[in-house]
Amino acid sequence: MQRVSEVIEQHQGELTKNQAAKRAGGRKESTLMAIDVLVLEKYVTPSKGRRGYEVLTSAKRYREKDDEQSDRYVNNGNDFTAE
């Protein structure tokens, strides 16, 4: 998801879902699903582009290291855990 998020960040309001998936690489089906999740979680906003196609804009950066659900999550030690 981070890879496609970065592609969308670099091309704000320029790419359709399929174009973003193609630029991000990887399996198209997985990349399209990642875009759907980014939209659902409000990282990416779809809107009508100049030609009437739905284009994608990044609302906020997605980084795997910040996502507790990711296997690449990095805990900065700011979480307080009582024992």
Image: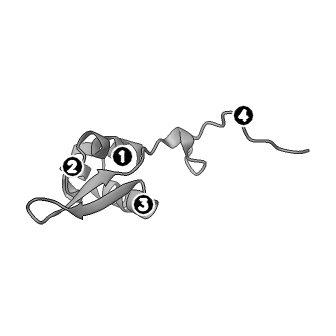
The structure residue drawn at horizontal position 33% and vertical position 59%, both measured from the top left corner, is 45
Q: Which mark is residue 77?
A: 4
Vertical side of 4 occupied by 47: above or below: below
* Labelled pair 2, 4 in contact (Cβ < 8 Å): no
- Crowding around mark 3 (Cα neighbors within 10 Å: few <14, some 14 to 19, many 20+) is some
Task: Kindly report the distance in space between the C-alpha atoms of the residues bearing marks 4 and 3.
Answer: 27 Å
Does 83 sit left or right of 20 as displayed?
right
Residue 39 seen in the current view: yes
Q: Where is residue 42 in the image (x, y as percent from the top left)?
A: 43, 59
* Labelled pair 4, 3 in contact (Cβ < 8 Å): no
Residue type, mark 4 in image? Gly
Residue type, mark 1 in image? Ser
> How is the model colour-coded?
one colour
Q: Give the labeled residue for mark 3.
A: 37
The structure residue drawn at horizontal position 24% and vertical position 63%, both measured from the top left corner, is 47
Task: Kindly report the distance in space between the C-alpha atoms of the residues bearing marks 3 and 1.
Answer: 11 Å
User: Closer to the N terminus: mark 1 or mark 4?
Assistant: 1
* Labelled pair 2, 3 in contact (Cβ < 8 Å): no
Q: Where is residue 14 in the image (x, y as percent from the top left)?
A: 18, 50
Badge 2 marks a residue whose secondary structure is: helix
From the image, state whether disc 2 or disc 4 is nearer to you.
4
Residue type, mark 2 in image? Lys
Badge 4 marks a residue whose secondary structure is: loop
Residue type, mark 3 in image? Val
Q: Nearer the viewer, residue 55 or 65?
A: 55
Q: Where is residue 10 in the image (x, y as percent from the top left)?
A: 27, 39
User: Closer to the N terminus: mark 2 or mark 3?
Assistant: 2
User: Closer to the N terminus: mark 2 or mark 1?
Assistant: 1
The structure residue drawn at horizontal position 40% and vertical position 56%, both measured from the top left corner, is 38
Residue 25 seen in the current view: no
Q: Give the labeled residue for mark 1.
A: 5
Q: Residue 22 carries which label?
A: 2
